[in-house]
Image (cartoon, helix red, strand yellow):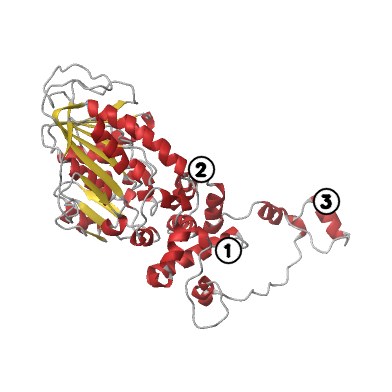
Amino acid sequence: MTPRPPSGAGDEPRRPFWEAIHQAQKRGPRRPKPARPPHPATLKPAARIAAQAGKVDKVETAEESARKKTPPRTPANMAARIVARSGRDLPADQELRETLRNAEGLRPGDARWISRAVFAYFRWQAWLDDCRPLEQRLDQAIGYSDTYSRQPQRFPDDDLVGGALPEWVREVMEIPVNWVRALQKEPRLWLRARPGMVAQLAEKLGGAESTHPGQLPDSLEYTGREDLFRTPEFHGGEFEIQDPGSQAVGLCCAPKPGEKWWDVCAGEGGKTLHLADLLQGRGLVYGSDRADWRLDRLRTRAVRAHLSNWQVALWDEGRPAPGPGRFDGVLLDAPCSGLGTWGRNPHARWTTTRDDVQELAAIQRRLLKAAAAAVKPGGRLVYAVCTMTRPETTDLCDAFALANPDFTPESVPNPFGTGEPAARHTFWPHETRGNGMFVAVWRRADRKAPSPGIAVAPESAPAGSEPPEPPLPTAPPPEPSVSETA
């Protein structure tokens, strides 16, 4: 289905509306100045002889020849190169980070424009004219984005649902129109301040305000234009870049000071650090991942935040849980299809498949079984994914409940302050203004019963009594990363 352009005026000939948006910027081509004959000293020997003999009308200088072979790297052609190189094996956000990290000579604002153009392209891809050069399509995509931010009513619901999502999504979940409309908006930038520091941080940064008062107590939306990764507040560990949906997961865990927790798939540690903050410096949280480079990022972030009640461990399914004994709480933020992040990462809409959903659901079932085995009697198990497909959410949780009667669903308040307490929450982007998340919570029966699954080391010390890792040497902050928001 090819989406129609937004509604225009009367019966006038239909033109892409982005042309009207940029009409004020259009100018006719300038008449070039007559070219001066090159000075003989700037010509190569053979060219100088040819010019003196009158055998050619125009001879290029060496500098002109070099410029023709290597065109200037403008923001527009850099963005076009990123789009052209992106694919299933090379996500656009990864290629964007690498390009900006290695770019030289960018002016202030160029990196922001390149990022916006790349993501706008994949957000409005179905509306773009494939007959136009790629750089013009980028300009066209930004035009759609600008118009949608001012006049979203010009885009019919059916066209948005048909153009903003792949067809297979209908087969695995219900599609609220408001969710699709939220996906087409440019994402907001969210921060998590250190506990009790929201007001001070907002005053220091400027352009930051708390938009979830009384709900997410440490959440700030940043609307300024300063590069946050260069601020002294960032280097001082006063905040993390973290989406409100991810912050809500930590609040659903609700760890109590003195408890021992395990963040199974910690990644680069956004939720691990949140749990460590919620423990108020007492107790311990283990962050594990199968990739050591992600754990290196976690270590760097924890050191920057001046936290000490954490440890990291390489872990993959089939291996023993880290540390001695079982845990008061286990968080499984499982790898998933990521539909809840498609507003922030629109390229993933066109690289994720229905087969991915089924394969990931099988991995999630195995990981959840392993995580459950590490929960002590009376402990809490939290399952979270940034997607809303049935195979990865309700279907999986129903199957787990049937196979594990010693785990009882436990109601927890909605961190956004809407609805009644429940054992399962779906945080939709159009309701939270962040990423979409699904969270389920269980409490294990308070009895000493063996549970099948991964091996767990014998209990050797009371929960929370293990000494934390020795302080690590201070490391430079990481480069800006999309995954910093996790």
Location of mark 2 (residue): 88
- Cα distance, mark 2 to mark 1? 22 Å
Report whether 341 appears left or right of 95.
left
Structural crowding at the residue carrying mark 2, measured as other residues with C-alpha within 10 Å and reported as few (<14), some (14–19) or many (≥20): few
Rendered residue at 53%/76% (across/down): 23
Percent position (x, y) of residue 357?
41, 41
- Cα distance, mark 1 to mark 3? 46 Å
Q: Nearer the viewer, mark 3 or mark 2?
A: 2
Is residue 7 positioned above or below 395 on the image? below
How many numbered marks are there? Answer: 3
Give the residue type at disc 1: Asp
Mark found first going from the N terminus, 1 or 3: 3
Question: Between residues 192 and 477, which one lies in front from this camera angle?
Answer: 192
Location of mark 1 (residue): 129
Q: Quadrant of residue 405?
A: top left
- Cα distance, mark 3 to mark 2? 49 Å
Report whether 302 appears left or right of 213.
right
Structural crowding at the residue carrying mark 1, measured as other residues with C-alpha within 10 Å and reported as few (<14), some (14–19) or many (≥20): some
**Mark 1, secondary structure of its residue:** loop
Question: Between residues 20 and 3, which one lies in front from this camera angle?
Answer: 3
